[in-house]
Amino acid sequence: MSKDKILLTGVGSYLPKNKTSNHDLAKYIDTSDEWITKRTGIKFRHFVANNEYTSDLGTNAAKLAILNAGLKPIDIDIIIVATTTPDNTFPSTASKIQKNLGCSAISFDVQAVCAGFIYGMTVGISMLKDGHGKKCLVIGADSMSKILDWNDRSTAVLFGDGAGAIILEKEKVKTKFCENDDWGILASKIYTNGNFYDILNTDGGVSKSKSIGFLRMNGKEVFRHAVEKLSSSLLICLEECNKDISQVDWLIPHQANQRILDAVSNKVKLNPNKVISTIADHGNTSAASIPLALDVATKRGKVKNGNVLALQAIGGGLSWGSLILKVGKPI
Ligand code: COA
């Protein structure tokens, strides 16, 4: 006997070459390494070059994820790109990446800002279950530096650029492995509350002002919502797949602020050593932060076959969500 499972089979990531420290930023904005480190945990972030686009970051990450899964680009049936900073207003950045990869997958973008990767994975999982294909590439890619206002030091120091990608595959798993256990994606919950539209947004947009605008944020409000909503969605997800927090091997959260990561692990009673943090080296890379952190954890040999991973993110919308998966194949 066999069961259909959605498995994570590959991961890859890419960071642009320009690595900028807090000390570098302090040369041209009124800030300090001490303030940024103490309030956020961030030490470095990477920035795209002038001629480097979100699609370039995404393509590089995608190639590595495809290779890591032992596949070729032509094997991919669906490409979903989570991004807030597309190359062009249209077509989708996913179309550009499809062209770069040289395949014919169904390709489109999802926009849920920093929660985009959880949204993209959830959409991809549903499409695989509904028979739109067997292999789905989910990419989180953002060039947040393009929408930062360098006169607003409370937001400009938080963000960076990058991309991460994963492969999800629908596979028949022999019951020898899954008879008494669950493998692959176990639960996913995504939420939106538009009442908080104004606490994290841009002050421009195509239909509003024919400009892209700058990122604006009420940091304290976002912080409060982040801790509460990330904690509750994680616990709901665990309940849905009959697991408790002690069964989570790694929490791989959106990397917004080390203090948010600490507050969430404290609230859900998860050992902080089980939280993957890349915030010091990457800053907040929006939709890219989860797959970037997953790739770092994998390369460090932390993620093992059979591990239960919890992924979670929150961003503008407000949009947020959590996802639980059990690694069913070595990645
Ligand atoms: N460097 C130095 N000082 C700064 C600064 C910077 N980059 N940014 C702000 N400050 C100053 C403020 O002007 C303020 O000074 P004042 O007390 O003289 O008025 C002081 O630091 C405190 O600012 P405040 O905004 O109260 O800090 P905070 O403790 O709330 O931290 C954030 C600010 C943005 C780090 C924090 O609110 C946060 O991380 N929020 C969540 C943001 C987030 O994760 N968003 C993305 C979600 S996807």
Image (cartoon, helix red, strand yellow):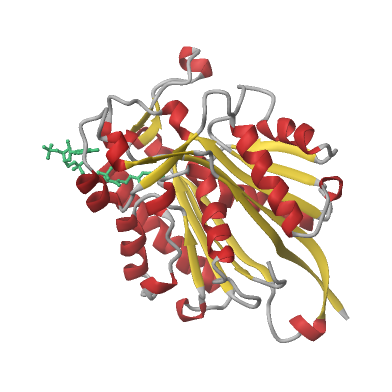
Image quadrant in which you'd find residue 331: bottom right
Task: Please tell me which residue is depicted at 82% across the width and 47% down the height of the picture.
Answer: 77
Q: Percent from the top left, x then y, of residue 170? A: 79, 62
Q: Percent from the top left, x then y, of residue 312? A: 49, 58
Q: Visible in this render: residue 291? A: yes
Instruction: Classify 26 as above or below 180.
Output: above
Image quadrant in which you'd find residue 52: top right
* Viewer-proximal residue among 113 and 16: 16
Instruction: Classify 9 as above or below 126.
Output: below
Q: Quadrant of the N terminus?
A: bottom right
Q: Percent from the top left, x then y, of residue 74? A: 86, 45
Q: Is residue 57 left or right of residue 213?
A: right
Residue furthest toward the top?
Answer: 210
Image quadrant in which you'd find residue 3: bottom right
Task: Please tell me which residue is depicted at 63% across the width and 47% down the height of the picture.
Answer: 120
Task: Please tell me which residue is depicted at 53% across the width and 39% down the height of the picture.
Answer: 16
Which corner quadrant of the figure contains ligand 1? top left
Q: Is residue 60 left or right of residue 321?
A: right
* Viewer-proximal residue among 267 and 17: 17
Q: Percent from the top left, x then y, of residue 34? A: 20, 48
Task: Please tell me which residue is depicted at 72% across the width and 30% down the height of the picture.
Answer: 96
Q: Is residue 262 left or right of residue 146?
A: left
* Viewer-proximal residue among 77 and 206: 77
Q: Visible in this render: residue 127? A: no
